[in-house]
């Protein structure tokens, strides 16, 4: 590390800081714009809302750059858009791709500096930087989905009470969007706005299910759609579903507590050999370097085979332990 030019460290640090600053500014701008639009739309009629919706679509289309129009041709574009929507990350797919390229370059540069120019550290940093954002999206999506499912029984109780008080289904949905906390209130605000601009309720609820892929929510939406077609007491139906979902949430919580030790053990046992390898490599590069740069060049393929076999076994062990701890309710 002593032979590294300090300018490299300054340049890499500046690049990482600039990437984080750009992502933060974009997220803040989009969040503030959404908040202002939500406040304005409360006081607009249906006709004005429709005009606003058309104007927003045309402005969004005109502002989208050449990169957006080019990437829309690929099949994975819709998948990326759906993942961003499910994680509630206010980025366009093109912005997400640029941010992912930035984290990949920053990870490779950090690994290069940490390993004093070693190829192994550089590749490791590149891989971690490349998969960092997808892992973040997956964790944020899982956390948001868990919060939504935990709020679902309270949402159903509020809807049941609203329907029995004489509210219509749309008014009950509006009460949910006003009274409950995010993320469930945010999602039902979108549902209410879509219905107000003329989208059928069935389509608006299907859009909600695409943003929140929850089995419990699917059950609720199916019950609401069937009730609209064949009739019946929606309040009694939702009350029964609420009791079922509440019991499932309770059982999932108990199972999560009982299996937490297995999940933690799987994660710790998977990360321990990797961390130990890099620690020893940093302390004694010649000793661990025999796997990648042996004194006998003929033994170089053997070192790579050992590293590959270790990675495969660690990965298989991690997924097996997580699968054991994953109990469906």
Image (cartoon, helix red, strand yellow):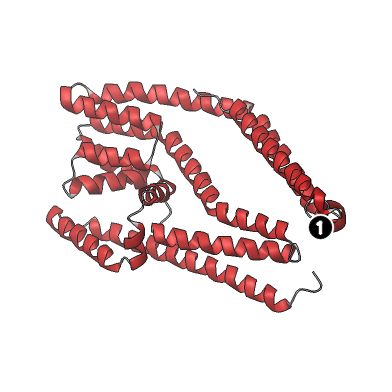
Q: Is residue 91 visible?
A: no
Camera-side residue of 53 and 160: 53
Q: Residue 274 placed where, x, y %?
A: 74, 46
Judge from the rendering whether residue 315 lies leftward or rightward of residue 227; answer left or right.
right
Write down the residue under mark 1: 282
Total tally of numbered discs in the picture: 1
In the rendered structure, the answer to whether residue 303 lies left or right of residue 94 reads right
Q: Is residue 102 above or below residue 79?
A: below
Q: Nearer the viewer, residue 266 or 193?
A: 266
Compared to 317, does 58 lie above or below?
below
Query: Can residue 103 be seen from the camera position used here?
Result: yes
x, y percent for residue 31: 39, 60
Say which residue appears at 42% left-offset and 47% top-offset: 83
Residue at 65% over, 66% down: 109
Residue 85 location in percent, x, y? 39, 49
Relative horizontal placement of residue 82, taking residue 313 as reference (left or right): left
User: Which residue, as the protein is rendered here, is positioned at the far front?
Assistant: 298
């Amino acid at each position: 590390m002593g032979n590294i030019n300090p300018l490299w460290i300054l340049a890499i640090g500046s690049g990482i800081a600039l990437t984080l600053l750009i992502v933060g500014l974009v997220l803040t701008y989009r969040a503030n714009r959404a908040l202002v639009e939500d406040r304005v739309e409360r006081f607009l009629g249906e006709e004005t809302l429709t005009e606003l919706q058309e104007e927003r679509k045309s402005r969004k289309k005109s502002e989208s750059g050449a990169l957006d129009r080019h990437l829309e041709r690929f099949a994975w574009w819709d998948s990326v858009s759906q993942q961003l929507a499910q994680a509630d990350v206010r980025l366009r797919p093109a912005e997400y791709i640029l941010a992912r390229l930035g984290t990949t370059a920053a990870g490779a540069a950090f690994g290069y500096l940490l390993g004093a120019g070693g190829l192994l550290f550089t590749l490791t940093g590149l891989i971690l930087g490349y998969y960092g954002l997808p892992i973040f999206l997956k964790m944020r999506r899982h956390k948001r989905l868990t919060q939504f499912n935990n709020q679902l029984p309270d949402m159903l109780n509020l809807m049941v009470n609203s329907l029995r008080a004489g509210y219509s289904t749309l008014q009950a949905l509006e009460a949910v969007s006003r009274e409950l906390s995010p993320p469930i209130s945010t999602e039902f605000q979108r549902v209410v706005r879509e219905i107000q601009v003329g989208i059928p309720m069935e389509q608006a609820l299907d859009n909600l299910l695409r943003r929140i892929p929850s089995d419990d929510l699917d059950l609720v939406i199916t019950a609401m759609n069937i009730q609209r077609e064949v009739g019946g007491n929606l309040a009694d139906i939702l009350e029964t579903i609420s009791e079922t979902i509440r019991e499932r949430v309770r059982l999932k919580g108990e199972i999560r507590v009982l299996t937490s030790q297995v999940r933690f053990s799987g994660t710790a046992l998977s990360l321990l050999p990797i961390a130990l390898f890099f620690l020893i490599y940093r302390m004694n590069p010649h000793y661990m370097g025999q796997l990648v740069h042996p004194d006998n060049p003929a033994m170089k393929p053997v070192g790579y085979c050992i590293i590959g076999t270790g990675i495969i076994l660690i990965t298989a062990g991690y997924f097996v332990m997580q699968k054991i701890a994953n109990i469906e309710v």
